[in-house]
Image (cartoon, grey):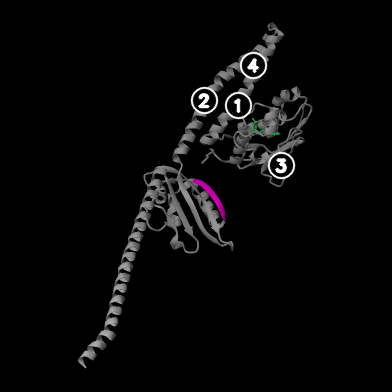
Amino acid sequence: MTENAAQIASTTFFPLILAGAFVLIVAGFGVFFMSTAGLRANARVSQLVRDLADARTKLLEAQEIGRFGTFMWNFDDPSKSFWSDETFKLFGLVPRPKPPAFESVMSTVHEKDRPAATQKWKQIMTTPGDFATTFRTVAASGQTRYLELRGKTTVDVNHILRHIQGVVHDITREKEIDKAKSEFVSLASHQLKTPLTSIRWLSESLLGPKSESLSEAQKKYVSDIHEASRRMAEMVNDLLNVSRIELGTLAVRVEEFDATELLKAVVSEQQHAATLKQIALKLICPEGLPHLQADKSQVRMVMQNLISNAIKYTPDGGSVEAELSLTGGRREVLFFRVSDTGIGIPKGERDKMFQKLFRAGNAQESVPDGTGLGLYVVKSVLEHAGGGITFDTKEGKGTTFYASIPLVWQMPNVEVV
Ligand code: ADP
């Protein structure tokens, strides 16, 4: 019986014990491997968190060095909106986890730029697509900074606004360099004016009664010198005007004058250039136009530029017409039209016409020297006065410019931001 019991025990329990031990060993290994995998995963997550924090620090440092900040506005959940530390600092605000209220941001914007900045932000908040805008901020210390905001307003497939993402960039340095450049151009142009006036005056007096003592060849040389100095004086004037516009120093002196008289004077000055090219120069002015209360030298410059361009870009034998009128419903505005039968403006180049230094391909071919500054100055002057300029053109057939000149100019000074 005892022998039997021992036999049963060895045949029944021993395999069970072995199986139990085996299960325990496998489970032990399982637990061991699982816990080391868990440890490894934990270590990996910690590493990723450290990498992320490191990348964030580097990004913030880069933003600080580059003087740019980033921001994001979430339409679905404004609490998820975000401003980087540098964005706060650029606006002169203390960095916080959440973006500041609109009013706090606006209180940092320069008083004069506030209405335009508010308007622009409203447009950005409602219009999908890319945007860019510039404005000034004033820090508590009184220091003014120029900021440029660039970004994109995005919508989803159902055209519902999702978010605004953008970059704020401190462009104060660029503005200062630009200002220094304009000041240099202004100074250089100013210095050039005096010797140029002497050359013009002396060559003009040589061409007067004194010219009898000159040979034909000498007369021709003096006449060429006179013409070249006249063109140079025009270019210097254009440069001076551009730098004044950019520096915000183009002073506006309002006085009352008769626009018809002024136009007659400008036309008679241009008559010589028109006669040389056998161009018929016609003037249309209705009786009794009201006087302007405007800057006479600026209105003269607008008239001069448009008429001299019309003559310049019209081939010999063509015609140019200059008209003043009060038509078009806006009685407070004087319309100035200049039409020519000239080279016209090529289709692909029309949208660049008022850009600084732009000259169309056909103009460069027919009149090699020109600055491409005249129309830019004309447009700036008219727009600052509350007027404007447009044109109609047909390549090879002619161009008509329409300038609207307010009858009463109000601003005491021009300021360009
Ligand atoms: P510029 O005449 O010195 O080139 P503007 O600024 O006065 O500079 O004019 C810019 C450009 O506009 C000219 O180069 C020319 O391409 C075009 N343009 C201006 N007026 C006319 C015109 N009446 N007919 C054709 N092209 C014109």
Label 3 – label 2 distance at C-alpha: 40 Å
Residue at the disc numbered 1? 235
Mark 1 vs ligand 1: CB under 8 Å?
A: yes
The circle on residue 225 is 4
**Residue 377 visible here:** yes
- Left or right position of 273 against 8: right
Q: Secondary structure at mark 2?
A: helix
Mark 4 vs ligand 1: CB under 8 Å?
A: no
The reply to whether the magenta stretch includes residue 129 is: yes
Tell me which corner region of the image, top left, top right, bottom left or bottom right, holds residue 218.
Answer: top right
Tell me which corner region of the image, top left, top right, bottom left or bottom right, holds residue 367.
Answer: top right
Q: Secondary structure at mark 3?
A: loop
Q: Nearer the viewer, residue 321 or 219?
A: 219
**Residue 391 visible here:** no
Ligand 1 resides in the quarter of the picture at: top right
Q: Earlier in the sequence, mark 3 or mark 4?
A: 4
Label 2 – label 4 distance at C-alpha: 21 Å
The reply to whether the magenta stretch includes residue 278 is: no
Q: Secondary structure at mark 4?
A: helix
Q: Are marks 3 and 2 in contact (CB under 8 Å)?
A: no
Q: Earlier in the sequence, mark 2 or mark 4?
A: 2
Residue at the disc numbered 3? 326
Task: Residue at the far top: name it.
Answer: 213
Q: Earlier in the sequence, mark 2 or mark 1?
A: 2
- Region of the chain picked out in magenta, as a range: 128-134
